[in-house]
Amino acid sequence: MNIGRVLVVDDENLVCWSLAKMLKRIGCAVEIAHTGAEARLKLKIFLPDLVILDAALPDIEGLQLLEEFKAENKDLPVVIMTSNFHSELAFQAFSLGAEDYIGKPFNIEMVELSVQKIFVKKNLSKEVKLAEQKLRKKYEPDQLVGNCPSMVELFKTINVCARNDCKTILVLGESGTGKELVTQAIHQQSARKDAPLIELNCASIPDNLLENELFGHEKGAYTDAGSREVGIFEQAEGGTVFLDEIGDMPLSMQAKILKVIENRKFRRLGGQEDIETDIRIIAATNQNLAAMVKGGAFRGDLFYRLNMMSIILKPLRERKKCIPSMVEYFIDRLNCEYGRSVEGISSDALKVLMAHNWPGNVRELRNSLERAMMLEQGKILSTDNFCVFPGSEHLRDGGCRFGCSLPEESTILLPPGGINIEKVEKEYIKQALSRYDGNQTKAAKCLGMTLDTLRYRRKKFGLEKYPATPLSIATTADENTDQDPAKIVPG
């Protein structure tokens, strides 16, 4: 087993031979260099995990080479060897970043112990970093993912908003498209990232408490105000305030928000003095604010002020090319969250996801994958775990092996442009008759209607001779053919 790569730099052949023998015995890959020039070359080609370096080389001082190596890779451990052992040299070596210092002649067992300790420390450091990455993935918010043109443009717009410190931004999009993630991305990429990001859902706070939540109050401002309370605008000083569902904010409060945006000042409830504020305000909604302005439900002046820089998030059904990369990302995230080891998704299951219209957008996709990973027993997500989507083969029997059923309101998705219900009815009748080779009894049962109703609608839609059955394969009527004339052989 290879525990790591070690570069030995020394001009004495015997030293190099003995060190290489010991290092190979404990499982290291070894390269030898006799000069500084050779060591520089092998550092770039061999990419060692550890360097054992003589302090005196024919063409350069070892400490100078140590300094070069650490400048190239500050995390590269270097052990200095010297036959002229003294405290001043050791102090210089450690001050330049040496991991250990060995005098010559050396005890090979002591060198082995030093090497083992260095690799144990290095491996522990890797494990800690991996653990930190897993924790970050588990607890940090989801990230925006996608490589389709609309997502590329979105990333560019986010970068512009963050880099230029836009003070007011409007984020528009259907529920579940990722408006909160856009806000987090803008905040994290801007100079305000070290200051607070505070979110307020305008639809979840009663109208009479919204002003207090944003502006705070002075002691005695109202009956229960026993002490001064700082509002969100003060708490987020220097940072970002995210006003989600701003379309639900009452008109009286909209006027006060507009004043804060224009004057960069506000006043606590019951206060006598204006308080200056330096915040970015990002507002978001899934409503049509322009239409609300026309209807008088939203202030036009606030809309135009917010709309100075707007970001429109397309629904997932309009950027389906992003779904494969999103699936890969969410599987990775959910593996960390639940301690699973799912490796991917089958091509058939991915086709089911690509065919779905995702009315709940990215949030629905994440939830669907989370559910699928809870059900999946293997390493690859299969179609069995996405039985609730139209297009899944398991819907033919009305359920799946887990006993799931599709909610009635989601069985058929109504197209945006509407539909001709008679055409749908005619098509389902044709499919049922075709499935049971014209057997009206079975077709009626499949469609959940009586035999008389099926016969009436078959005549209504001109399907009396559908499907056409060749005489050569027709059979005499029995209990399953209900004496349909189209199924009886003449004579």
Image (cartoon, rainbow, N blue to C red):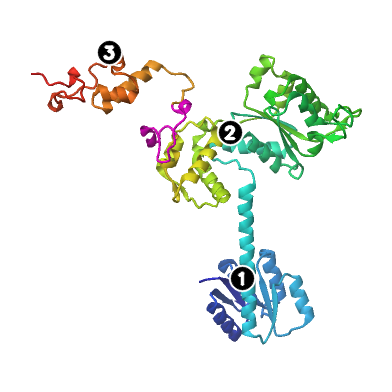
Badge 3 or badge 2: first in the primary sequence: 2
Task: State whether the magenta stretch is mostly helix, strand or loop.
Answer: loop
Picture coordinates of residue 354, whole percent (x, y): 45, 36
**Alpha carbons under labels 3 and 2: distance apart:** 47 Å
Structural crowding at the residue carrying mark 1, measured as other residues with C-alpha within 10 Å and reported as few (<14), some (14–19) or many (≥20)? some
Picture layout, residue 283 above or below residue 48? above
Task: Please give the label number shown on residue 119.
Answer: 1
> Is 143 displayed left or right of 276 in the figure?
left
Q: In which quarter of the image is residue 400?
A: top left
Q: Name which residue type carries label 1.
A: Phe
Q: Where is residue 83 in the image (x, y as percent from the top left)?
A: 70, 85
Q: What residue type is labelled 3?
A: Lys
Q: Nearer the viewer, residue 150 or 350?
A: 350
Of 389 and 159, nearer the camera is 389
Query: For the residue labelled by badge 1, is the local secondary structure a helix, a strand or a loop?
Result: helix
Nearest-to-viewer mark from 1 and 3? 3
Q: Earlier in the sequence, mark 1 or mark 3?
A: 1
Q: Percent position (x, y) of residue 139?
A: 64, 47
Residue, disc 2 = 177
> Residue 443 is drawn in which quadrant?
top left
Q: Do the residues labelled 2 and 1 touch (CB within 8 Å)?
A: no
x, y (%) of residue 268? Answer: 85, 30
The residues tagged by marks 2 and 1 sit, at their Cα atoms, a distance apart of 46 Å
Count of numbered circles on the image: 3
Question: What residue would you read off at disc 3?
Answer: 459
Residue at 20 percent across and 23 percent down: it is 481
Element under disc 2: loop
Sequence-wise, the earlier of marks 2 and 1 is 1
**The C terminus - image quarter:** top left
What range of the chain is rendered magenta?
389-411
